[in-house]
Image (cartoon, helix red, strand yellow):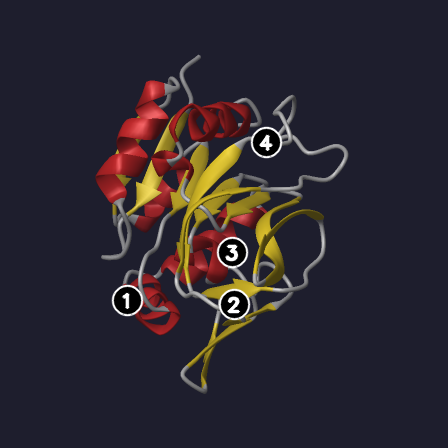
Amino acid sequence: MTPKVVVLDSGSGNLRSAQRALERVGADVTVTADTTAAVEADGLVVPGVGAFAACMAGLDGIGAREAIAERLAAQRPLLGICVGMQVLFDAGVEHGVETKGLGVLPGRVEPLHAPVLPHMGWNTVTPPEGSTLFAGMDADTRFYFVHSYAVHDTDGLVTWAEHGERFVAAVERGLVSATQFHPEKSGDAGATLLEHWLRTL
């Protein structure tokens, strides 16, 4: 059976490339701001680019906070990508201003301390034992990152990366999966990760 996936359109994120990448690995994808569809789909993808506060404002503008809570209460999985991952945490701090996140994952998004920002380009990651997303991937597999903020500590199965300092590159915690990098821009490695996620739906 083809999994039905909603890519949530809150006005932030690379929606079409996420759609194409998921279709490439066999999902039936709808891009929509309809929160009922977002609650009921087999899988929900929350993309996001740009500023944490702007992404949260877009999500709150379409009622996504309630929809995501309802979805998780109904035991349905979701995948956050880039700023769509960051907003799943408790809070984000940008330019000294703290914005409340969705609070689905414990932790705070704070500036990344590195000689060059943003962290832009390909980087390797270190997944934990038992990871579903990264199962069977080589240690030198690279993913595509674009960000200046990161989470430095959280719970769950945490995949790490380094740019100036260690930060959370991905997390798997119950029904929630999230990646700081862009799987939809990460070629075959990203496609494999999305395929692994689809198998959990």
Determine the CA span between mark 4 and mark 3: 36 Å
Mark 4 or mark 3, which is nearer to you?
A: 4
Determine the CA span between mark 1 and mark 3: 15 Å
Determine the CA span between mark 4 and mark 1: 40 Å
Crowd tier of the residue under label 4, counting other residues whose Cα lies within 10 Å: few below 14, some 14–19, many 20 or above: few
Determine the CA span between mark 4 and mark 2: 22 Å
Does residue 39 appear anywhere in the picture? no
Query: Sequence order check: which comes first, mark 3 or mark 2?
Result: 3
Q: Check contact, mark 4 vs mark 2: CB within 8 A.
A: no
For disc 3, the marked residue is 69
Q: Check contact, mark 4 vs mark 1: CB within 8 A.
A: no
Query: Sequence order check: which comes first, mark 1 or mark 3?
Result: 1
For disc 1, the marked residue is 61
Q: Toward the viewer: 185 or 13?
A: 185
> What is the three-letter code of the residue carrying label 4?
Asp
Q: Position of residue 41 (x, y in %)?
A: 40, 34
For disc 4, the marked residue is 140
